[in-house]
Amino acid sequence: MLAVSLTTTRQRLSYCRATLISLAHQTLSPDKILLWVSRDSYLRDSGIPSEKVLLDELAPLPDSVIGLLDIRWVEELVKAVSEIPRLLLSARFTPLFDDTWITIK
């Protein structure tokens, strides 16, 4: 199984939709996209108050993303690192990934 795991903050939600779509449309599509978010304020993150706010900010998401997306809530995003299962792919923040970012060589 190929899973992509990422975190986002309230301040970055405007980029998150495009990021999720670009990850779902890779040449090698992931089986799951784990999106880690928090309701709590921490450092520069003001927190995402509810799932409704999160989904409203991400809307509209295509079915190709909805079928892969698994939203995980944690107290603080810094704690998500200990919650994330073995990380298969890791990348610095970028809103869009080239469609060949996930490849097997």
Image (cartoon, grey):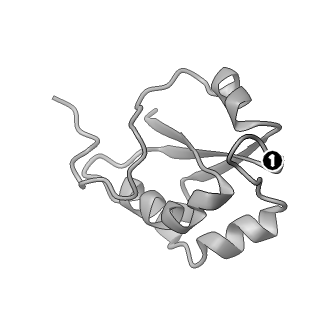
Q: Quadrant of the C terminus?
A: top left
Q: Nearer the viewer, residue 49 or 42?
A: 42
Q: In this view, does 50 lie to the left or right of 29?
A: right
Residue sitting at x 67%, y 58%: 10
Q: Which of 13 and 58 is in front in this view?
A: 13
Residue sitting at x 69%, y 75%: 56
Residue sitting at x 36%, y 60%: 22
Percent from the top left, x then y, of residue 55? 69, 69
Percent from the top left, x then y, of residue 80? 69, 31
Q: Is residue 57 left or right of residue 1?
A: right
Q: How many labels does the image show?
A: 1
Secondary element at tag 1: loop
Percent from the top left, x then y, of residue 4? 47, 39
Q: Quadrant of residue 91?
A: top left
On screen, residue 7 above or below 24 = above
On screen, residue 3 above or below 8 = above
Where is mark 1, residue-wise?
41
Q: Residue lying farthest front?
A: 43
Circle 1: residue type: Ser
Rate crowding at label 1 as few (under 14), some (14 to 19) or many (20 or more) other CA atoms within 10 Å. Answer: some
Q: In this view, does 49 lie to the left or right of 21?
A: right
Percent from the top left, x then y, of residue 26? 30, 53
Q: Quadrant of residue 19?
A: bottom left
Q: Residue lying farthest left?
A: 105
On screen, residue 26 above or below 72 = below
